[in-house]
Amino acid sequence: MNIALLIEYDGTNYKGWQTQANAITVQQTIEQSIELVIANKINLIGSGRTDAGVHASGQVANFRINEINIPEDKLVKAINSKLPRDIRIKDAKYVKEDFHARFDASARRYSYTLACIESVFDRHFSTFYKFPFDKQLLLDSGKFFVGKYCFTSFSKNNPDTKNYICNIEECFWEEQEKFLRLRIKADRFVYGMVRSIVGAMLEYSRKKISREEILFKLNNPNRDRISPLAAPNGLVLEEIYYSDKIF
């Protein structure tokens, strides 16, 4: 049986999604909770990795098991009873046997939130940027990144990544009462890509780099010209898209 999960988490206290030695991660925590419920070892496959301190409201993952005697509508409650309060399973579905949370995803959407006012209550889910910047330049910068590019200059190095080409479908900032929020959707994202893009946008809004320099880096990828990374706490993985809608 193949079971898909819709997951939200506050990534503040975790070293990212992916299981790693000597660190507490989201994947590892969920796996251990499921194993307590079903009394079997599992391998939880996420739609993608999130960095330390990054959050998710719509992460999707799946795992396979030979047999399970918990009804679909009871599974969410059973797993959540074993999880810490900063991770919640929002939904669970029995899906077709060959469904793969990562490889079947057709697109992903993130948001990045900048706080206009520093607040202790917003600090985990938004970034207060301490330097003055031109808000209109920031709002204008989203359109620079729409399209299909190699994002080597806007990502962190990952030895497992062989291809840095991504197609960004949407990239725009929204003004809200206390926040500026970036919405970005692409067919795929590489390691640190959104944080690097936001870092470049902030540099542009401070007139540290020009539009021409950003476009040059997009069209002439080079890791020597990598953009600075924005802080992780403003970043949220919001939605994973599949050709056959699951949730």
Image: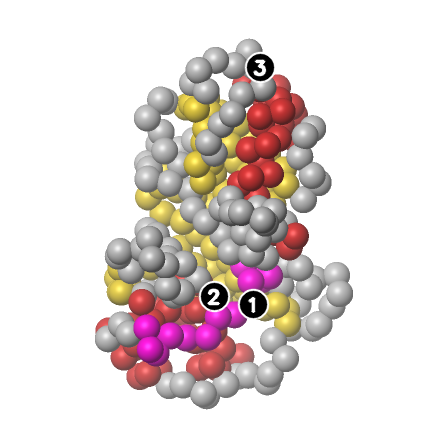
Disc with the residue nearer the chain's start (2 vs 3): 3
Disc with the residue nearer the chain's start (1 vs 2): 2
Residue drawn at x 33%, y 53% as measured from the top left: 160
Residue 48, percent from left and from top = 43, 46
Element under disc 3: loop
Q: Mark 1 is on which residue type?
A: Ala
Residue 9 position (above or below residue 226): above
Residue 187 position (above or below residue 222): above
Residue 38, percent from left and from top = 58, 19
Q: Is residue 233 magenta?
A: yes
**What segment is highlighted magenta in the picture?**
223-238
Residue drawn at x 26%, y 65% as measured from the top left: 149
Q: Are marks 1 and 2 in contact (CB under 8 Å)?
A: yes
Q: CA distance from mark 3 to mark 1?
A: 40 Å
Front-lying residue, 112 or 192: 192
Residue drawn at x 51%, y 32% as measured from the top left: 5
- Can residue 4 be seen here? The reply is no
The figure's colour scheme reads secondary structure
Read off the residue under disc 1.
231
Read off the residue under disc 2.
195
Q: Mark 2 is on which residue type?
A: Arg
Read off the residue under disc 3.
70
Q: Mark 3 is on which residue type?
A: Ile
Q: Quadrant of the N terminus?
A: top left
Q: CA distance from mark 2 to mark 3?
A: 40 Å
Q: Residue furthest right?
A: 120
- Can residue 3 be seen here? The reply is yes
Front-lying residue, 103 or 132: 103
